[in-house]
Amino acid sequence: EKKHEGSYPMYRVAYNGHEKYMYSDDELNRLVKQQQEKKGNIVEISNVDEEKGEGIEDSIEVQEFHESGEIENTVKLIEKDGFKAEGFFKGPEENELPQAKLICDDIAIEIYSLGEILPKIKEIGKKGLDIQRYKGLGEMNAEELAITTMDSTSRTLLRVKIEDAIKADEMFSTLSGKDVKRRREYIETHALDVKNLDV
């Protein structure tokens, strides 16, 4: 949402109880230099997933928005086609009139924002499909097992092997623990590193 002269922020920086958004590397470097001059070059810089910066008075916490450039390019393409990025997430309660109509065969769905298009297309694509999820094989009957898990021509077996038990435990604590803030920060920081995501 924070826009500066047509561009989107590259960094969120927290320091001395303040929070600022930076729109270039030069802007970030100037801030770091200013803080170093004030503190006598004793300034610790950390990423959001590094706990060592937390609670240290002379520290600068930096969160980089890796997708900033991509978002900016996408917004330009959207605006080039006559749409406004500000209305991407607006729903029927905010847009009185539909912005477009999605038509597939005999189905016509009114679209109130760009953000609705992909979910609505998926919704149409799932019509007639029966998607079931099971916690274990014991929940499936014999016929279902025969055509899925027990059919060697169509099943996929994956072996998960974790060598470092300490790192594995730490990862499970981060992603499945009760600390929501820690989990959110980890996901935001490492989102671009994900290769295969099963949602």
Image (spheres, rainbow, N blue to C red):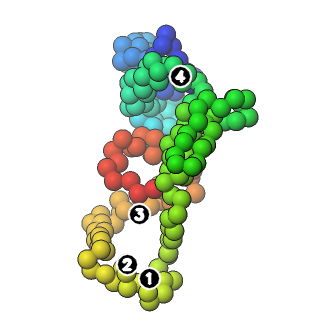
- How far, Cα to Cα, is label 4 from label 1? 47 Å
Lower position in the chain sequence, tag 4 or tag 1:
4
- In the rendered image, residue 13, in percent from the top left (x then y), is placed at 48, 25
Residue 169, labelled with which disc? 3
Residue 1 falls in image quadrant: top right
- How far, Cα to Cα, is label 3 from label 4? 46 Å
Residue located beneath label 2 in the image: 148
Secondary-structure class at tag 3 = helix
User: Dot 2 surroundings within 10 Å: few (below 14), some, or many (20 or more)?
Assistant: few
Lower position in the chain sequence, tag 3 or tag 2:
2
- How far, Cα to Cα, is label 3 from label 2? 32 Å
Secondary-structure class at tag 1 = helix
Name of the residue lying farthest toward the front: 106
- Inspect this view and state whether residue 76 appears: yes
Closer to the camera in the image, 87 or 34: 87
Residue located beneath label 4 in the image: 83
